[in-house]
Amino acid sequence: MSTLLETRNVSKAYGVFRALENVSMSVAEGELVSVVGPNGAGKTTLVNLLTGLLAPTSGEVLFMDKSIAGVGPVALADQGLARAFQLIQIFPKLTVAETIAAAVVSRQKKRWRMLSQLSADTQIHGKVRKVAEIFGLDSRLDTISSALSQGEKKLLDVASAFALDPQIILFDEPTSGVSTADKHTMMKTLLGAAKITGVKGIVLVEHDMDLVSAYSTRIIALAGGRLLADLPPKQFFADPHLIETVIGKRRTH
Amino acid sequence: MTISSAAVTALAGTVALALLPVVAPPYYVGLMIPFFGYAIALLGFNLLFGYTGLLSFGHAMFLGLGAYGAAVLSGIFGIKQFEVVLLAVIMTAALVAVPIAFLCARYVGIFFGMLTLAFGMLFYSFLFKFYHLTGGDSGMRVPRMNILGFAFERYNKIEFLAGPFYYYCLGLLVIAGLLMWRIVHSPFGLHLQTVRDNAHKAEYLGVHVRRFRLAAFVISAAFGAVGGAILGFRIGLADPELVYWTHSGQLVFMAVLGGFSNFFGPIVGALTYTLLQDQLQSLTEYWRSMLGMILALIVIGFPEGIAGLAADLPRRLAQRFV
């Protein structure tokens, strides 16, 4: 298993506040790594480092053995790293097809084509249709995004990230805003899509321990900006003390 | 809008405009020259505003560049070919737009608007103060030029404007319209619209947000210069008022009037404004306040503008009768 994404001894400080201290972690091919921890543990900072949005104060962030410290989201999208956010992100005035096509245009490096017509590009259309089918959006291709249901918007948001054909994809609470009953359906859709589109690794930031235990191949726990644990789910959930630190004392069952 | 309905609209509009000199008195035909200038400039302006989501309050500076460029090239350097002048002002405007866009494209919303306003006024004060270069408040003369190599010496200025130059400008508008249609329906155009709708999400889909804002700004500047050259040609003068901020405001007015979320909106806006201003000016000295009231009505009642209303009309009628 080759390593796709890793941090080596990264620290990140905002002024005097140290959000992350000396964290080393990695994601290898075939893995779904969950990042867990209480609020303020540094999960968001870690993800922002992993997506090149922030540069670490010290340490290295590598994607396929290349440094991606602070390179920004566009360069990472080009290199094959996609990210979906907790809050639904759509393009309100664009149709479903156009939204997915925006990612396909980037992927096929056609962004500077000013005079060729999008409607005549069968390569783009084929890919858009394929991605839409995976997410069950193929009957909604010509619908304006703002007219979609909440669940469809979430699917579209994620579908557009998959349309980049990423090597690795980062999900920030992908089931937030999805009803409890549909959580597992959503996760299965995502994992199914990952398999079909050839995504090699997944990073999942998640509060919901049901999902974390059901789908992770490895769990990384952060607390107070430090790496608390890096374990397979079985060993992780065998340690009651660890679970208590990570999810706090609210959990009673 | 589907391609076929857009093609029908464009064709009908072009035919109507082509027939106008046959049926309308020369006065109205001459009045259409500024319409062509504004329509071309607004096609560019709307790439920036309607498609990229950036509202410039200094866009008149590029119209000014077009007009002053024509004055300098034909008046001082004696270039008599209008096509050469057009190419030169397109390139000049694009070059001037690059550094301005570089500074402005970091900002959005009101900050972008204010910065473009500042650059526009900077250019205005340059034109106004450097009397020996620009003629100050009296401006610079724009001599009559040849179009397509013909001088049309038999025609006096009025006949020339209402005849050959009218069709020349119609041709320019058709070319500009086709070019802009292709741009907004290209992969590039799609990325511009993602920047408008959600720049944050766009970045994560590999959209070069800042570079695309810059590109849209440069293209819109080039269209503005063509419009400005036509305006200058018609009045025979490049005037600093062309660059004054109220003129930038007038461009915004036209775009909103016509409807900036519709491809044809800016053209409809330019036409409506030109006719409205002419009619109101002959009716009342309070024409500016009348224009203001009409704009307020449009914004409140029909936020999609006249073109949006027209595009929506079949649906509204259908709802009423079904």
Image (spheres, grey):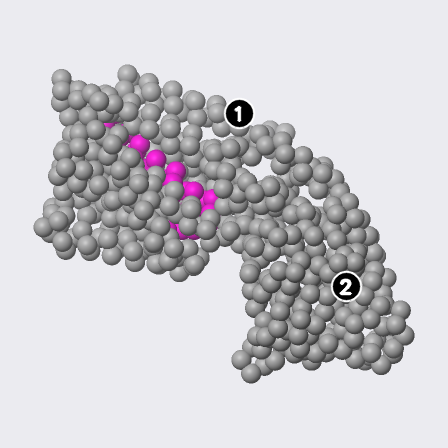
Q: Nearer the viewer, residue A201 or A66?
A: A66
Could you tell me the amino acid type at mark 1?
A: Ser
The disc label shown at residue B4, or none: 1
Mark 1: secondary structure: helix
Q: Residue at x 83, y 60 (%)?
A: A215
- Viewport quadrant of the C terminus of chain A: bottom right
> x, y (%) of residue A125?
64, 35
Q: Are marks 2 and 1 on the same chain?
A: no
Q: Secondary structure at mark 2?
A: strand
- Between A21 and B210, the one lying in front of the other is A21
Q: Is residue B13 left or right of residue B313?
A: left
Residue B279 x %, y %: 26, 34
Q: Which residues are magenta?
A: B29-56
Q: Quadrant of residue B139?
A: top left
Amino acid type for the residue under numbered disc 2:
Val
Residue B88, image quadrant:
top left
